[in-house]
Image (tube, grey):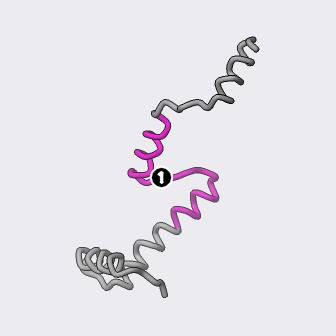
């Protein structure tokens, strides 16, 4: 039993219709498969990301960070400054 908002329920119903299965069967098909992947990844001690998650991760890594004043000062100290 899962509580969902109306929009989420409608989305699940639409996805189930696309696969021509009941909502319950759709939820089982998708959630069990995802749970198996996550358990397997945890056992392998690896991180597995969806394509959307991979893109978000890449974009976050690709951004130039904005250093704080403390980080700039630490960089100066590490380079031999004061």
Where are the magenta residues, as a range? 36-62
- Whether 44 is among the magenta residues is yes
Check the image and report above or below for 73 versus 55: above
Res. 17 image quadrant = bottom left
Viewer-proximal residue among 51 and 46: 51
Check the image and report above or below for 25 versus 69: below
Q: Is residue 81 left or right of residue 43?
A: right
Provide the major secondary structure of the magenta segment: helix
Check the image and report above or below for 38 versus 54: below
Give me the residue at 29% from left, 79% from top: 10
Q: Residue furthest top?
A: 80
Check disc 1 and report its element: helix, strand or loop. Answer: loop
The image position of residue 58, as x and y in percent, is: 45, 40
Give me the residue at 28% from left, 74% from top: 15
Give me the residue at 47% from left, 44% from top: 57
Q: Is residue 77 left or right of residue 52?
A: right
The image position of residue 5, as x and y in percent, is: 39, 80
Check the image and report above or below for 10 versus 56: below
| Residue highlighted by disc 1 | 49
The image position of residue 67, as x and y in percent, is: 58, 30
Viewer-proximal residue among 67 and 31: 67
Give me the residue at 76% from left, 14% from top: 82
Viewer-proximal residue among 16 and 79: 79
The image position of residue 64, as x and y in percent, is: 49, 30
Specify few, some or many for label 1: CA neighbours under 10 Å numbering under 14, 14-19, or 20 or more. few
Q: Is residue 47 left or right of residue 8?
A: right
- Whether 79 is among the magenta residues is no
């Amino acid at each position: 039993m899962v509580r969902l908002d109306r929009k989420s329920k409608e989305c699940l119903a639409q996805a189930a219709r696309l696969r021509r299965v009941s909502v319950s069967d759709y939820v089982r098909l998708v959630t069990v498969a995802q749970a198996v992947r996550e358990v397997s990844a945890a056992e392998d001690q690896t991180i597995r990301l969806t394509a959307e998650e991979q893109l978000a991760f890449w974009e976050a890594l690709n951004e130039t960070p904005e250093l704080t004043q403390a980080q700039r000062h630490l960089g100066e100290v590490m380079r031999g400054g004061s």
